[in-house]
Image: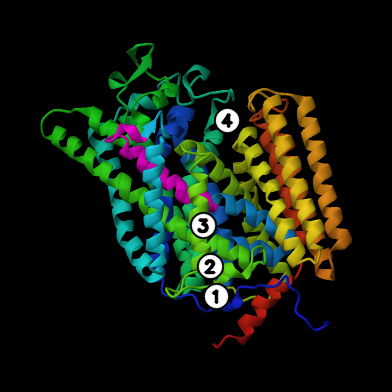
Amino acid sequence: MSGEKPKSGDLGLESDKQLRRSLGKFELLYLSLGGIIGSGWLFGALYTAADAGGSAILSWVIAGILILFVGLAYSELGSAIPKSGGIVRYPHYSHGGIAGYIIAWAYFLSAASSPAIEATATVTYLSSLVPSLTVNGVLTPAGILVAYLFLVFFFFLNYAGVNILGKVTHGAGWWKLIIPAITVIILLIFYFHPANLTAGGGFFPSPSNVALGSSGIYGFSAVLYAIPTTGVIFSYLGFRQAVEYGGEGRNPKKDIPFAVMGSLIIALFLYTLIQLAFIGGINWSVLTVSQGNSTVPVTVGNWTELTQTVLPSGPFYQIFKLAAPLGLLSLIFGGWAYILLLDTVVSPSGTGWIYTGTSGRTVYGFASNGYLPGFFLKVGKTRIPVYSLIAGTIIAAIFMLPFPSWQALAGFISSATVFTYIMGGIGLETLRKTAPELNRPYRLPLAKVIAPIATLAAGLIVYWSGFATLFYVVTGIFLGLALFFGYYAHKMLGISRGLSTVVGIVNIVITLVLAFEFYGATSSLTAANNIAFLIYVLIMIGLVAFDMAVVSGLAKGDEVKNEIKASYWLLAYIFAIIVVSYFGGFGLNPIIPFPEDTVVAAIITLAAHYGAVKSGFRTQAIQDILEETREAPP
């Protein structure tokens, strides 16, 4: 038994070899670009303007720059270790199974729900033609049924294999790029109202003219708050597709950095112009809101009221439909409105089928790490991870039920995904330390500087999402500990099945009871309750400490001890950031005002970065990768 390879290695090495490597440079580029240009361009501009008014433009610029740093980190990781489902596998390579599991689970929550949001977006836009599909922007049972039909279509296109998927995505990618670009040109040239940029009290609107809701966030704070909550960062997250499909690329070591950075640079310029065109294209005089049994005109500059007009059913479609210019322009605007309706099927669907594949590869990556049974590593006759694809599609359908509106899904997905992106910079710098001999075709310059900036960018985006969204994400993460004990702790760490099952059930019960109690004590996360928050935090810390004590006391092997040490920074970071979030400018009891709260969050995130790098170790999984690389033919 002494010569037996530890179970915590990379279990997907053999199945990786069965995947079809047929995606070229531009197919990987359009997978990333297709993931970026989807429902975000159709809805994000509306909800970002509702939060930040004219200054919404800055949300896209700031987010684009921040995510570029994250993309740089993943460019090196994806080039050095091109693996399908790579983003959930890299933390396992750098920090082992415990921290790797927590990060992978958070990513899984977002990846599995992403196809649902694209199907939801398509049906929401189609409600302009069939109103019975939605009520106040929320899918009706009929709307959910139609969305399920889209999910089925996404599945079968992926099942056909990456060769067909890549070609279809490449073709659809040109459409998805051209249609938004022409929309921007038409609005900027023929229907631009520059006064809108300062409507509502200036470039940063006054409190009465932005979507404060219960948060009371306005001014430059609203610019930052909008990044994770209104679809801005959600739109940029598509860059990950080239990394996720990396194991199926023809020359991924060179092509992944090209696809990741190329897609992000294109998106930064395009989305900034889309937001500018939307703000300038608003004609306040033709917009109305319901008031009792009648309708009244929208007040000029009241950005909040935009979400109460017809715009949520199809923002750009409604702008073109309501414009009604004279002469030839009326034909252009009327015709383009219907082109946009067609695009509401093409753009979200294109992103939906890409994310369906990503969801399947995330499940595949889970199994490669040993977090799920090897059954999910099975590659089908079309040389795709077929059972992982089926599981991902089913989970997407489940997510449609509790989150039947686009905006509700976007905020949750964005924060859950970006939370995992703290591992981009951490993974890069850790593997530079623990696996210096790893072949890196793309070696990021100034990695010692860029890596912590990438971690900082991801951490701040998560913090800016606000306490309510972060609370949902953290609750989701802790619920995942049930699966950790129910499967991984028993199968991979050697803890008895009975004890693992009991601990898993205890985690579910305590996490859910605490979450519901705190939710009720804070009036649905809208009012401060310091006592309830203290109870919540202390009991959750106790629960996690109990979990770690069980693993530390009963798990077997030196590698497990290293995994435990390599997870402390992450657990500490989760609790530290949620405490700062509660008491910060985006929280329920803003004792620490903006921007001081952001400085505190930045310090905590940087401390987590360096703590993570220090605790990283040479895992069996990265050792397997190095051995595979040495054995591979030149």
Residue at (85, 49) in percent of width and height: 546
Q: CA distance from mark 2 to mark 4?
A: 37 Å
Residue at label 1? 16
Q: Secondary structure at mark 3?
A: helix
User: Disc 1 marks which amino acid?
Assistant: Asp
Which labelled disc corresponds to residue 470? Answer: none
Q: Looking at numbered disc 3 in the image, what kind of residue is underneath it? A: Gly
Residue 391 in picture, x, y percent from top left: 53, 59
In percent of width and height, residue 7 lies at 73, 73
Q: Which mark is residue 392?
A: 3
Q: CA distance from mark 2 to mark 3?
A: 14 Å
Question: Which is more foreground, mark 3 or mark 4?
Answer: 3
Residue range corresponding to the magenta coloring:
111-133
In the visual, does 210 lie left or right of 107?
Answer: left
Instruction: Say whether disc 2 or disc 3 marks the residue closer to the N-terminus.
Output: 2
In contact (CB < 8 Å): disc 1 and disc 4 = no
